[in-house]
Image: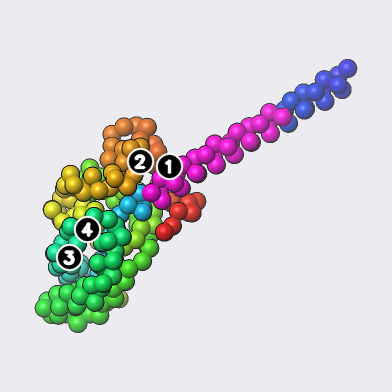
Amino acid sequence: MKTLLNIICGKKVKYSILLLFLLSLYIFISTFSYVNAVSRDISNSVFRLHVIANSDTKEDQDLKLKVRNNVLSYMNTICKDSKTKQEAIELANKHQEEFKQIALNTIYENGYDYSVNVCIGNFSFPTKTYGDISLPSGYYDALRIEIGQAKGQNWWCVMFPPLCFVDVSSGIVPEESKEAIKSNLTDEEFTLISNQDNPEISFKFKLIEFFQKNHLLTAKN
């Protein structure tokens, strides 16, 4: 009788462990699917700018900001009225040589002779906040400008929707830019990047960061 009870108890423990494993697996898969989809949708809604300084010296960092300002000014003239991300990318691609020349001219005017590399691609970005909009870390399409050896600190912004044209220093987000982002996201996804005061939303945002940090997501453009 004791042996039978041991067998029954042993089976119950095994079933409990199996059920716990399956439940954990289900939760992980569900969370992964949610985070991966949200991360992909957010990434697909924006086109970013990435400027990398030659080095971390004060002079090179100051130069990076001057290049940034001139590039943003030009970008604003050619695609401030872009209605879609793809339209902004096409314009940036069409004027890629102009971006390079603007960067080179800025560098030469400030007494340097650094080379410049300009490319459009899909790159890894850390979490970044613009006013009341926070974009989680992940892979985003971007115009990348590398100055000289490109070993200095980075500067990021969002070219579409224009989250950095109005006020570069404070990152004030105009309502029309928010609407452009919102039109490409579900209500929950937009809330996720615009309402970090909500504990539940903040937790979901941190989930995305956790999956990205540990390279668990597959969402790349």
Image quarter for residue 143?
A: bottom left
Q: Is residue 19 magenta?
A: yes
Between discs 4 and 2, the one toward the N terminus:
4
* Residue 30 relative to residue 106: left or right: right
Q: Residue 100: tell me if it is visible.
A: no
Q: Quadrant of the C terminus?
A: bottom left
The residue identified by callout 4 is: 82
Q: Position of residue 33 (x, y in %)?
A: 50, 44
In this rendered view, identify the residue nearer to me: 110 or 27. 27
Q: Secondary structure at mark 2?
A: loop
Q: Is residue 16 magenta?
A: yes
What segment carries the magenta color? 15-41
Q: CA distance from mark 4 to mark 1?
A: 32 Å
Q: Position of residue 45 (x, y in %)?
A: 32, 52
Q: CA distance from mark 4 to mark 2?
A: 21 Å
Residue at 17% over, 65% down? 78
Q: Which of labels 4 and 1 is toward the front?
A: 4
- Crowding around mark 1 (Cα neighbors within 10 Å: few <14, some 14 to 19, many 20+) is some
Between discs 2 and 1, the one toward the N terminus:
2
Q: Secondary structure at mark 1?
A: helix
Q: CA distance from mark 3 to mark 2?
A: 29 Å
The residue identified by callout 2 is: 186
- Crowding around mark 2 (Cα neighbors within 10 Å: few <14, some 14 to 19, many 20+) is some
The residue identified by callout 1 is: 207
Q: Secondary structure at mark 4?
A: loop
Q: Quadrant of the N terminus?
A: top right
Image quarter for residue 75?
A: bottom left
